[in-house]
Structure formats: C-alpha cells, structure tokens
Amino acid sequence: MEKCTEYYNAADIFGENVFNDSVMQARLPKKVYQKLKKTLREGRELDLETADVIAHEMKEWAIEKGATHYSHWFQPLTGVTAEKHDAFITAPMENGKALMSFSGKELIKGEPDASSFPSGGLRATFEARGYTAWDCTSPAFVRQDAAGATLCIPTAFCSYTGEALDQKTPLLRSMEAVNKQALRLIRLFGNTTSKKVTASVGPEQEYFIVDREKYLKRKDLIFTGRTLFGAMPPKGQEMDDHYFGAIRERIAAYMRDVNKELWKLGVSAKTQHNEVAPAQHELAPIYASANVAADHNQLTMETLKKVAGRHGLQCLLHEKPFAGVNGSGKHNNWSIITDDGINLLDPGVTPHENFQFLLVLTCILKAVDIHADLLRESAADVGNDHRLGANEAPPAIISVFLGEQLQDVLTQLISTGEATRSIRGSMLETGVKTLPDFMKDATDRNRTSPFAFTGNKFEFRMLGSQDSIAQPNVVLNTIVAEAFAEACDALEQAEDFDTALHDLIKQNATEHQRIVFNGNGYSGEWVKEAERRGLPNIRSMVDAIPALNTEKAVKLFEKFGVFTKAELDSRVEIEYETYAKEINIEAKAMIDIAGKQIIPSVIKYTTSLADSISSVKAACGADVSVQTGLLMETSKLLAQTKTALSNLEAVIEEGMAMEEGREQAVFYRDAALTAMEGLRTPVDKLEMIVDKEMWPMPSYGDLIFEV
Ligand code: ADP
Ligand code: MG
C-alpha cells in the first residue's frame, strides 16, 4: 500500500499551472493588462496587438513550466474535450537553432480540421473548416502528463459560417442573455451599481472506482464504460470492516493525488466523500462562473480518469456501470450573482429585497414550468436513460422543490394575494405587503426532487455523470432570461410599479404552481399526480430529443441569440445518431463477449461436467445426479444464449442498415435494447452456475467490493 510521503501546502500549489489574473498582473505590461481586463469586463473582442503581447507572455510562462506545445482546448459535440497540439518551435534559423514562438493570432484563433467532429449536417464535408476562438474569460493552463507539458487554451468551436459546433459557444451566449435580462431586472429595483450578472455553477460529480487489472478483463467496461453482463452478488455479501480499512487507504491516496492535480489547475476541488453505492464517490468544487465551471468539470473528469491509472485503478464515469447498483449523476448547483456579490437567489433579510427575490423566484418557476421538456432534454444522454425514468432517481418528471417555508409564502401569495407571515420567522409582521424573512435552510431535506431550492441556489439533479454540464446551463440561463425579459417588459411600462410587481408575482405563482412539488418524487403517486397536473414525464432520451427544436424552443433560443434553428436541427440530428451509435457499440460488444468469451467458457464447463459424470460413473458408479442436473441446466441456458445471440446479431444488422435519424434511434431503443436484455438474462443465470474459475471475467462482487 502506497503511503503518503509528500506533504504540501494546498494554498501554495493552487493555480500553480494557471495563467490566471495574478500571473497576468505580474507579467503583462500594465497597459496590456488593463486593456485585457477592460475587454473581459465589457465582453468584447481582443485586438491583435494586445493579443500578441499576451501570447508572448503566456508562451514564456508556459515554457518555464516545461511546456513544449500549445493546444486549443475545446468541447465538440462528442461529449469529451478535443485538442490539437502544436509545438512552439518554428523553422530552424541559419545557425541551426530553433525559435519558440506563439503569436496573438495563434492565441485567439485556431483552425483545426473539423471534418471529424459531429456537425449534424451544419458543415458539409467539403467545407471541413472549423475555427476555435479563445474564451478569454476562462484562463489558459498548463497540463502536465505523460505527453509532457502543454499550454491549453480554452476555446469555443465554430464552423466557417459561425455556427456553433461545440458546447461552449451556446453557453457563453446564454450567459450573456441572462446577464442582460437580470441587469434589467435589478435596475427596476433601484440597483444602479452592479455591472454584470453571472450564472454561477457548482457541479457535484459522482464516479465509481474499480481495480484496473480487473477492469482490463472486462471488455464491456473497456468498450462501453458499463457492464453489459453481470449477476448481482448475493445479498449479504458486503465488505467486512477489515476490507473497509484497506479500501479507504487506496482510495484516499487516489483522492489526495486527484486534489493536488486539480488544485494545480486552479480547480477548487472542495468536498469528497463516499456515495451510496459501494465503490462510488463524489467530488464537488467551489462554484464558479458557468463557463469556467463547465471547463473545470471536464478537467475534473479527465483528471479523475488519468490519476486513477497511476494508482492501478480505473475511474468509471458512466451513469450506470452496474445494473442493480445505484448509478452516478451530477448535481448542477446554479445561481445568478452580480459582480458586486449580490446573489439574486438569496432570499435576503429585508422585505424590499424579498420582493426582488420573489419576482426572481416566480420567474424561475414560470421558466421551469414552460420549458420542463427542454430541461429534461438537457439532462439526456444514452447512459442516463438507465437512471431517469428507469427504476432510479431522480424521476424523469421535472418539478421544483421549494421547502416548507417558501411554499407557505407562495400559498399565501396565491390565496390572498399577499404574504404577511412566514412559518418560523416572526420578526416581520408589519405592513400589508410586508414579506416574511426567509430563514436560510441549506439542508437538503428532499433528495427526491430533480430541481430543488437549497437556500440560495437551485440544484438541478438530473444530469448524467459523464455528460457535459454545458447544455443544462444553456437551457437554465436562457429560459430564465426569457422569464426575466417578460417580467421587465411588463414592469418597465407599469404606471404603478408596486402594484404591477405585486400582481406579476402573484400571477407567476398562480399560473405555474403546478410545477412545485415538495413530496416524495420517487413515489408512484407522484407519477399519477404529475400526469393529472399535465406535467411531462419523458422516459427516454429518444423521446426527449424532439424538445430541442419545437417551435417554442426555436423561438426561445433565437430570441436570445443562443441557437439558430439550423443549429438546433443539427443538434437533434447529432443526438439521434449518437444514441443509435452508442447502443450499436454496446450490442456489438455483447455479441463479441458472448460469442468469444462466454459461450466457449460455458462449453468448457459443460465438458468438465460431462467428464466428471463419466469418470465418476466408471470409477464406482456413485450418484452423479448433481453433475447431471447442472449439465442439463447449463446446456439449456447455453442453448438460450446462442439463440439470443443470433437474434441480437439479426437485430443489429437491421439497425445498421437503417438511415440515421429518429426512426433508427427508436429502433435501437426498442428492438436492440430488448434483444440485448434477451441475451443478458441467460448469461447472468449462467454466471451463477458456472465454476467461478472458468467464468471469463471478474464478477460484480470482484469489481465493486474488492477495490
Ligand atoms: P449541499 O451539500 O447542500 O448540496 P454544498 O454547500 O455542499 O451544498 O454545495 C454543493 C455545491 O454547490 C458546491 O459546488 C458549492 O460550491 C455549490 N454552491 C454553493 N453555493 C452556490 C451558489 N450560490 N451558486 C452556485 N453554486 C453554489
Ligand atoms: Mg448537493
């Protein structure tokens, strides 16, 4: 067991590999630094002259950290980050020495060959060009790994004609939308000083850790990230205390290393703990602006995987690596905060601010109610289908949890038009329209809600563990911007602001109260109740996708310049393709494993049973009924396996012959998944019978309990 031999001051290493504000302040000429800050503040483009100076300093700094290459780091629609590395080195000079160079142009704009990234028809293949553009609101960093050190520049990725081909472009656009509308809103309440409102996000990341050697014996994990076969270990087979100690050491050493790597990259990894399922853990950073949080979450996922390798471990980010074992998600904590530190989701202490809060709150209720389908879609990925709407939380129905106190205020508003008291606070009881002081209650009392108010933020809990957090935040920012815009349109015109405000809060609360649900989201009654309320219950990704380009969605996204219709259409196409492709890979992996590993092993086992039967009989004629019974049962299941395998092969052949699109995706969800289940069932039964020594791969018990 590895021992901790290295101690360090976390504050010293934090951000060590980041070209952050203090580095820039120290290294850039004052004028250039101020110009960059101004550009950042005003959200404008950087001029080439300034970019040249920054690029030069950035390069010098990176070379000091050992960097030999730079890379535009971006998030195409494949779900993972992409990068193309270029060396700093330029053509050798006359004396045979090479120069290291990096220009402002190379910093702010890149031109990777985009033809191999999904574009959903946006970019014809002959027009392969795509551009990456520096997102200077997310700092550059140096990543050190086996490939050496690389200067990574967070970028947005667009087509030649400016259409977004990535996750980040729409995220930045949506942040701008919510910034603009939120500023309008706070101006109505007399705030003249805040200059910017930022969507802020803290994602909690769940993951599994298994032993790498065992992982390497599971082709399903290698190819698809999840187990496609595997019988549950018998009940009661739990870790004993002794084992527990050993597990903790190994994982603790791993986490220590992960934290260190993340801190160096300026990712504020803050909390870590074990999760419900064995071998499952969670990591949460301190919240940051949405685009930085999205970048950092990608870095976190990369780091979790990379560091695991060094410890002989494997990190599984899939939403459902093990059937029957709790899956992994991501909780997206979201709030909107001004540049001078006012959180618009903070209930506040004065009635005056509470009015603003109530408007913000009821606007969010409205947004979530109207666009529940879009939020649901934003959390859809192939792996997450095993959680949402399956027998696992959270449910696929979007609802909002407010908690007792806020619910009470809302009820008062709806029934009498005024809220005059709060359940527990009794300090504020003057004046007709005085609103209660909300007690902050950060405790998370309802874990079954997909969208819960937790003190001064909303926690969107539907996200899949391996998915980018970009799209959920694009949707959140944009739908809230829309509700704010509509509120401002009404209030800016109002003759009597107070009355209009009061009426609007009441109207929003009344019209959208159906989205609020404070009960148990996992119960069967809620499903029925939600149906009565007319709330959508979208059980699969395939059924969620159409929400992306409905008339309502196109109108929303075009109004705020977040997506064009063409961009939405292309994303719909990509999602259907992704769905079919991923299931196809899973099916093919099953076919491979069943045909090349499982069936041959089972045949060997039947042969050993048959040998035993004949030799025992020949030796003494003793009772061989056990062996015979096993042989009969195994042979029966073996035959079923073969039939199911042939069936799956036929189904996949049919699926692959289909044209890409919705119909194919539906086919994969219905026919392919059913055929896969049909193959898994006899195989899992066989696993319970066949001699463990002969089973060709580690069991669930080996993987989950013996880390
Ligand atoms: P809990 O344990 O109740 O979910 P935590 O305080 O542990 O809450 O926060 C979980 C995540 O939420 C962390 O990433 C944290 O930084 C983030 N968070 C806290 N406050 C905010 C906020 N105002 N806006 C966005 N994220 C926040
Ligand atoms: Mg939480």
Image (cartoon, rainbow, N blue to C red):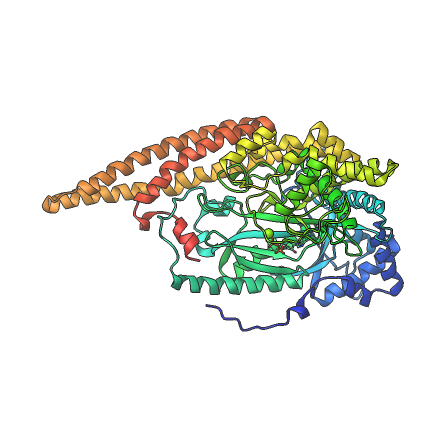
What count of labels does the image hold? 0
Of 241 and 150, the residue lying toward us: 241
**656 or 21: nearer the viewer:** 21
What is the residue that sits farthest to the left in this orientation? 620
User: Quadrant of the rendered structure where residue 626 is?
Assistant: top left
Name the residue located 75 percent from the left edge and 61 percent from the top edge: 20
Task: Give left or right: position of 186 versus 636.
Answer: right
Which quadrant of the render holds ligand 1? bottom right
Residue 588, image x and y in percent? 48, 37
**Picture coordinates of residue 526, whole percent (x, y):** 54, 35
x and y, in percent, of residue 471 in the image: 67, 42
Instruction: Using residue 297 as the reference point, say whether residue 656 is left or right of it.
Output: left
Whether residue 659 can be seen here: no
Q: Say which residue appears at 43% left-offset and 35% top-offset.
A: 677
Against 661, residue 349 (above or below) is: below
Residue 220 visible here: yes
Residue 616 image point, x, y percent: 15, 46
Instruction: Name the residue: 63% across, 38% down.
Output: 516
- Specify the quadrant that holds the C terminus: bottom left
Q: Quadrant of residue 600?
A: top left
* Above or below, comparing residue 693 to residue 649 in the picture: below
Which quarter shows the N terminus? bottom left
| Residue 625 drawn above or below residue 13 | above
